[in-house]
Image: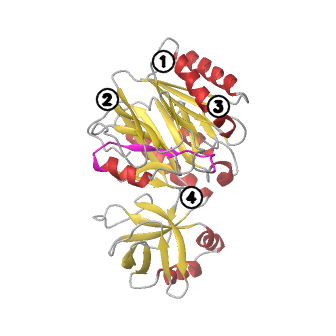
Amino acid sequence: MRFACHLSRRAEARHAVAEGVEGLRSELRTDAPDLLVAFASSAHHPQLGAIGAALRAAFPSAVLLGCGGQSVIGGGVEVEEGPGLSVTAGVLPGAVLHPVRIEGDRVPNVPARSDVLLLADPFTCDVATVAAELDRRGTGAVVGGLASGADAPGASRLLLGEGLHSDGAVGVAFEGMRVRTVVAQGCRPVGHPLFVTGCRDDLLTEVDGRPPMAVLQDLYEQGDARERALLSNALFLGLEMRPARTRYERGDFLVRNLLGADDRSGALRVAAPLREQQVVQFHVRDAHTAAEDLSERLGALRARLDAAEEPNPAGALLFSCLGRGRGLYGSANHDSDRFRSHLGDVPLGGFFCNGEIGPVEGTTFLHGYTSAFALFGAQDEEEDRDG
């Protein structure tokens, strides 16, 4: 299995795709790729159909998948401004690739236990419903992102084979190979885990017998200036994913946004359904926390690979939130650099998404403020599918 990735920053789409094709051919030499994944920045969105046609002409035996993004990632470089075209190619001997086209929420048949790479339109695809259906059918890991850079329904661009779509979702299901995932949510817990003792659907009315706003007030009064600023401006709620656990640490929670508060009752509205006796914990997010969480996740993968004496992934894709990058860290290429520091010079493509798709504790979710990695390697049927 071999991968190559090329990033072009040429302003004209035809020059960018020609440069990408030449770069991939140079890396792969005589091998013809089985998979092509292309991400085009906003400047190239109008030409994405022509870009796809040129890539298919250059590599006619490859399954083509791609979409438009506000900004793209390739070769360890995160191009957050200006034109960019990122193309990743994979030579996948022994693997069988199944193109997947989803219109609305109608999910076609996907081979059982096959991992799925998924790209979706944020306006017309209910990703949560699609992901739940794929999980129910027993697929493997589902990872990907929502197209970005479009500001209205019908403006997104999704590539699958010869088709250019503006709605639903496109993807590829893989048989005979492994797609690992790493999902870094970028938050850390504050305070202590709490039991939900009162809730109505997504309205959290009571934790440990108290209004959640009262618990937050205690955390605020106990915190230093930095902690108070995070509690005021970067607050989330984590939902436990393994009820049998008695001890919880960072990464054991699914992190969800808080949508509003009722000052009179002290209740909070959460971007997720809740249930009584569920364990929850407040979380905060900042650049330091996001960097630390990403390093811990990648470091854990590095340790597992070393312990099993497994090689590095052959290639990878990064689906990163638009809220990360330079705007969060103050410098470019942060997450790509962290990836390379742990896993070396693995070909890495990707884009900045309107939402990131990836598993937490074996269940697929749509995330925000997250970096989700798809890592391509040999199939290992005995290992967990989510990381």
Q: Which one is earlier in the sequence, the residue at label 1 or at label 4?
A: 1
Which residue is denoted by mark 1 in the rendering? 60
Hey, what amino acid is under mark 1?
Pro
Which residue is denoted by mark 2 in the rendering? 176
Q: Which one is earlier in the sequence, the residue at label 3 or at label 4?
A: 3
**Residue 139 magenta-drawn?**
yes
**Direction from residue 246 to residue 23 in the image, left or right:** right
Q: In this view, does 284 lie above or below 368?
A: below
Which residue is denoted by mark 4 in the rendering? 289
> Label 2, label 1: how many angstroms apart (C-alpha)?
21 Å
* Number of residues whose C-alpha sits closer than 10 Å to that of mark 3, classed few (under 14), some (14–19) or many (20 or more): some
Which residue is denoted by mark 3 in the rendering? 47
Dot in front, 4 or 2: 2
Span of residues in magenta: 136-151
**Residue 11 magenta-drawn?**
no
Dot in front, 3 or 4: 3
Hey, what amino acid is under mark 4?
Thr
User: Residue 75: in sight, yes or no?
Assistant: no
Secondary structure of the residue carrying numbered label 1: loop
Q: Which one is earlier in the sequence, the residue at label 3 or at label 1?
A: 3
Q: Which one is earlier in the sequence, the residue at label 2 or at label 1?
A: 1
